[in-house]
Amino acid sequence: MRVAFVSMFTSDHRDTPAVRRAERVAKHLAARGHKVTWLCAQWWGGTAIPEFERDGIRYLAVTQAPATETFRAKLPFRLRAAKPDVVHAVNVPPSHATTAKTAARLLRVPVVVDWWETDEAFGSEKRYRKAARKPDAVTTPSETVKTEVREHGASGDDVVVVPESIDFDLVRDAAVDDRFDAVWARRLDEHANVETFLLALAELRDRDWSAAVVGDGPARDAAEQTARDLRIDDRVTFLGELPPAEFVPVLKGAHAFAQTATYEPFATELLWALACGCVGIVEYQAGSSAHELVEGLDRGRRVTSPQELADEIVAAGDLPTKQVDEGFAGFDHDEILDEYVTLYRDLVDSYGLF
């Protein structure tokens, strides 16, 4: 199958969860033998080089640098040159998703828009409404984001939840790092809310425990200062950002994982933790989808305050230790890629192309 990805940005321009999600799908498709083309602003050197190949993906330059309106104007011509069977567009900027659909209609091929979040810096509410309504299907990482897309006007039947994925073989095979009892992990930004975790730990200062905070970002210094102010900095280790090969052993050795972020389209770190057998404790937040992963789960808890979080960390000690939860094997990269491929094929079949 020939799949054309439409995203002006790659992670070489703008490293965001939405772009990383699309890149992962593209790489795995290419590894399976599908012909993958990515239409983007040029990120490689040489102004006279219109295309570049990496990881089995053919990158075609629509513009030499990110320029939203110029990219939109030139996209139809590049899309026609790519000769796709299906188009996979990232929803930001939204005008590119709608332009991709207009061009694809002339090519008689379907368009899937992958929707992570709405970024007002790249488009108005009107443009996001068009991006939600025009494609043949919209994929979202969670029910929370699906609700947002439907509020933009998409038909519920056209919106499909395709969650994030993890390397489950790594979960099975990784060693165990048992230095920490409780772990918190996420990018440390304005939405992190790691303070709830630290306040919960402070409630337990009279107990014997050790904890890790995994992640980096602009809020890290403030978080480390909070740990010092609460006089728990001797038992909380800030590990910084870790690659999966180092992150998974920490999770396999821990017993509880706390998710407290105020905004999260999909709680990937929580998914890793649950797969590694951690008791997942989620502070409910209106802007986060994390609660979806622990609903109905024996080793999942929802809380609304630092005190409740502290209580659940203690209660987690009554549950047996576990280092791999096979119930999450369905989130493996291959399994989730199958969901995309099935969607592509169903849409292609509906167009009567094969």
Image: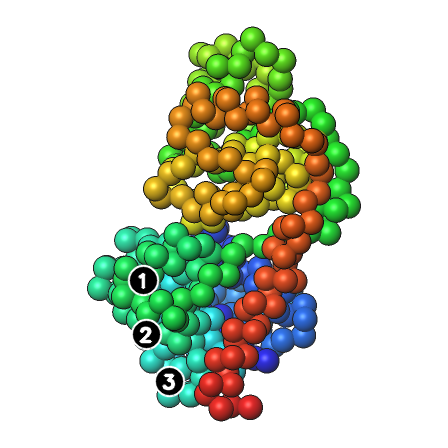
Q: Residue at x 57, y 33 (%)?
A: 257
Q: Residue at x 75, y 34 (%)?
A: 176
**Alpha carbon of mark 2 to alpha carbon of mark 1: how far?**
12 Å
Q: In this image, 319 relative to 77: left or right?
A: right
Label 2 crowding class (10 Å Cα cut-off): few <14, some 14-19, many 20+? Answer: many
Can residue 327 be seen at all in this image of the molecule?
A: yes
> Relative to residue 299, is residue 1 depicted above or below?
below
Q: Quadrant of residue 63?
A: bottom left
Label 1 crowding class (10 Å Cα cut-off): few <14, some 14-19, many 20+? Answer: some
Can residue 83 be seen at all in this image of the molecule?
A: no
Say the numbered circle drawn on residue 343: none
Residue type, label 3:
Arg
| Residue 142 at x, y percent in the picture | 45, 54
Q: Residue at x 43, y 76 (%)?
A: 111
> Relative to residue 171, is residue 156 depicted above or below?
below
Q: Which residue is mark 1?
A: 150
Q: Earlier in the sequence, mark 3 or mark 2?
A: 3
> Relative to residue 73, is residue 94 depicted above or below?
above
Query: Relative to the observer, which residue lies in front, 113 or 161?
Result: 161
Q: Earlier in the sequence, mark 2 or mark 1?
A: 2
Residue type, label 1:
Arg
Q: Secondary structure at mark 1?
A: helix
Query: Relative to the observer, which residue lies in front, 121 or 73?
Result: 121
Q: Which residue is mark 2?
A: 134
Q: Which residue is mark 3?
A: 105
Viewer-side label of 3, 1:
1
Q: Secondary structure at mark 2?
A: loop
**Alpha carbon of mark 3 to alpha carbon of mark 2: how far?**
10 Å
Q: Earlier in the sequence, mark 3 or mark 1?
A: 3
| Residue 174 at x, y percent in the picture | 75, 42
Q: Secondary structure at mark 3?
A: helix
Q: Where does the C terminus fall, quadrant-wise?
A: bottom right
